[in-house]
């Protein structure tokens, strides 16, 4: 083996170890100490149930409002399109504390929108609705980007042929465009759900951590890690398992890639 190959594979091994060893260590710790024994059942089930309920609601909102936005961004041409795309995807890289602060300023009682809602007797901050909005804010861009790519991958010739046959507007979208982009849309939904399930920082700042009301599984880990490490480990293992399932589903739904044709001769 040449020294260049040795260096590449050595660096790759270090990167792989850095990314996988902490996860394996957590799993091993949970199995060795049987972390599931003695887990307080008064806090774990409510957090699990709330996580599934809020992520389900955020997924429906993302699907309902994110799909039209993805379609418009995929099919429309306008001068500020790149800037709009950047704004839509900004929450992906935005620091969680900044995301939570932005939501608080927007939907708080004295916020841009929250003030109007407060006058109408509607409070969002520190409620379950705040959890759903925080999850949507940080996770929806993943779905919008995937759906946008899916819509852009639909051959224009197929849509033109459907128009010739009389399909137009909503019928064209429902019968032609949406089915052809369904795999990308489904993959985006799975990734968005996984991101929403693991949301922590924005939720903590915007919704708080009230047991049975706003305390999701990531917030439960944060609250109990000092007094009950076993419960924190067990909750973490549940999140790891769900994340692995989501990633596996997303990869299965994504367009197939050539396995060997992308290999580089230098390796």
Image (spheres, rainbow, N blue to C red):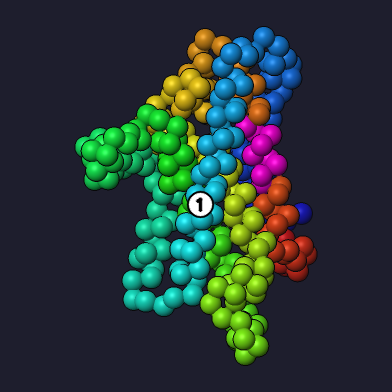
Element type at marker 1?
helix
Q: Position of residue 250 (x, y in %)?
A: 67, 52
Q: Main secondary structure of the magenta part?
A: helix
Report the quarter where the C terminus lies.
bottom right
Going 41% across and 57% down the picture, which residue do you hit?
A: 88
Residue 109 is drawn in which quadrant? top left
Q: Position of residue 84 (x, y in %)?
A: 37, 64
Going 75% across and 66% down the picture, which residue do you hit?
A: 258
The residue tagged 1 is: 62
So how many labels did they put on this image?
1
Instruction: Report the side of 243 relative to 147 (left or right).
Output: right
Report the quarter where the N terminus lies.
bottom right
Q: Is residue 153 visible?
A: no
Nearer-the-camera pick, 161 or 259 = 161
Give the extent of the magenta segment. Answer: 239-247
Q: Position of residue 261 (x, y in %)?
A: 75, 69
């Amino acid at each position: 083996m040449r020294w260049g190959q040795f260096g590449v594979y050595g660096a790759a091994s270090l990167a792989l170890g850095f990314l996988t060893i902490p996860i394996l260590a957590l799993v091993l710790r949970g199995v060795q100490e049987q972390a599931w024994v003695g887990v307080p059942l008064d806090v774990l089930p409510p957090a699990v149930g709330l996580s599934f309920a809020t992520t389900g609601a955020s997924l429906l909102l993302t699907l309902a409002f994110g799909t039209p936005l993805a379609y418009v961004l995929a099919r429309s041409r306008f001068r500020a399109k790149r800037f709009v795309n950047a704004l839509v995807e900004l929450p992906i890289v935005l620091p969680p504390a900044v995301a939570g602060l932005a939501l608080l300023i927007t939907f708080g009682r004295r916020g841009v929108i929250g003030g109007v809602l407060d006058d109408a007797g509607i409070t969002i901050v520190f409620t379950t609705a705040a959890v759903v909005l925080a999850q949507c804010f940080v996770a929806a861009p993943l779905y919008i980007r995937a759906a946008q790519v899916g819509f852009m991958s639909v051959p224009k010739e197929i849509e033109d042929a459907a128009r010739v046959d009389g399909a137009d507007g909503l019928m064209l979208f429902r019968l032609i465009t949406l089915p052809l982009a369904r795999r990308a849309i489904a993959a985006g939904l799975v990734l968005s759900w996984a991101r929403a399930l693991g949301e922590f920082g924005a939720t903590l700042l915007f919704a708080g951590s009230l047991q049975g009301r706003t305390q999701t599984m990531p917030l439960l880990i944060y609250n109990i890690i000092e007094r009950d490490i076993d419960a924190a480990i067990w909750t973490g293992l549940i999140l790891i398992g769900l994340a692995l399932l989501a990633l596996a589903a997303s990869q299965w739904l994504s367009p197939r890639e050539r396995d060997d044709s992308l290999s580089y001769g230098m390796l």
